[in-house]
Image: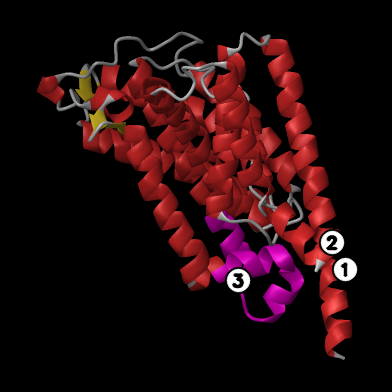
Amino acid sequence: MRGDTLLLLMRLRTVIALIVVLAVFSAAAPNFLSSANMVLMLKHVALNAILAIGLTYVIVAGGIDLSVGSTVGLTGMVAGFLMLNGVPVGGDMLMRFNLFEIVLIVLAIGVLIGAINGVLVARLKVAPFIATLGTLYVVRGAALLSSDGRTFPDLVGDAYYGTSGFPFIGGGYLLGLPVSVWLLGVIAAVAAYVAMRTPLGRKIYAVGGNAHAAALSGIRVNRVLIVTYMVSGFCAAVVGLIIASELQAAHPATGDTFELNAIAAAVLGGASLAGGRGTIVGTLVGAAVIGVLGDGMVMMGVSAFWQMVIKGLVIIAAVLLDGAQARLQHRVAIRRAAALA
């Protein structure tokens, strides 16, 4: 009974951590839980959570994706380039795109980057860390080359070309909540349904648990891995669109180190870096902890340097607790089996 109780507490550790940080910061700053501040925190959490959802798929399948931050930067730059410049098609002619077409192109580029990562890992057998680290540099370099390191400013859109609604994606509100939060809700609901209720979701968990056994059972492991990286690239592209829209500008350095917060959210939410374990709901709670912790430290005037130290300690603690939970779960399972024998 004692082991079962401890195991339950460890499984709920992210929820407990969220309650603790909310209590601490609300006591330290009376206006921390004000409606305006909560909406602002939701916007920050939404960006990290969308990235972390895509990474959860990759991590559950036994991989890692370090390129999501760079993908955020490149996709934002692509959106800015298409809105301001169009695409030359010969001579002095330009092909211009409306907002819907730009969104589709940007999302397709995110998926393509994910597919490249997937092929490197699944087909060419490059270690996920090395493959996505290389992609990180290539994609960030492409973002810088797209404007020679300059910002694409004044992305307010143009009614003549059908792009005037671009600022609404990241800066608009629906029923009192930011559009980015609604996008998170849709993406999270679809991702959770696919993970828990579809054959693809079961295959992802099987591949992460034991890729060799999954292959022997008839699962196309390579295809599943590629799909998870494509999902990660898609989520990164969504974040790139949201940020460029909210700022009404695109900068090639956007998204720098975003992958670290997203990985932290997924791991804190219970995703195992060894693969085979993790949930979308857990990732959402993990993203909330990271977001509340970050915003709370800013409100308390904590140095940016100390914020990095504290976030690093949180990641280390999450990994240590994940390992402790796995060992405890193994002991509890052995004890139950012995009791039934």
Q: In this figure, which residue is indicated by the disc labeled 1? A: 331
| Label 1 residue SS | helix
* Crowd around label 1: few <14 · some 14–19 · many ≥20 (10 Å): few
* Residues at discs 2 and 3 in contact (Cβ within 8 Å): no
- Type of amino acid at the residue the image marks with label 3: Arg
Which of the 4 image quarters holds residue 237?
Answer: top left
Q: Is residue 132 above or below residue 78?
A: below
**What secondary structure predominates along the stretch shown in magenta?**
helix
* Crowd around label 3: few <14 · some 14–19 · many ≥20 (10 Å): some
Q: In this figure, which residue is indicated by the disc labeled 2? A: 328
Q: Report the span colored magenta.
A: 202-228
Q: Is residue 206 left or right of residue 231?
A: right
Q: Choose between 117 and 210: the one closer to the eye.
A: 210
- Type of amino acid at the residue the image marks with label 1: Arg
Q: In this figure, which residue is indicated by the disc labeled 3? A: 220
Is residue 208 within the magenta segment? yes
Residue 3 appears in the rendering: yes
Q: Is residue 193 above or below residue 41?
A: below
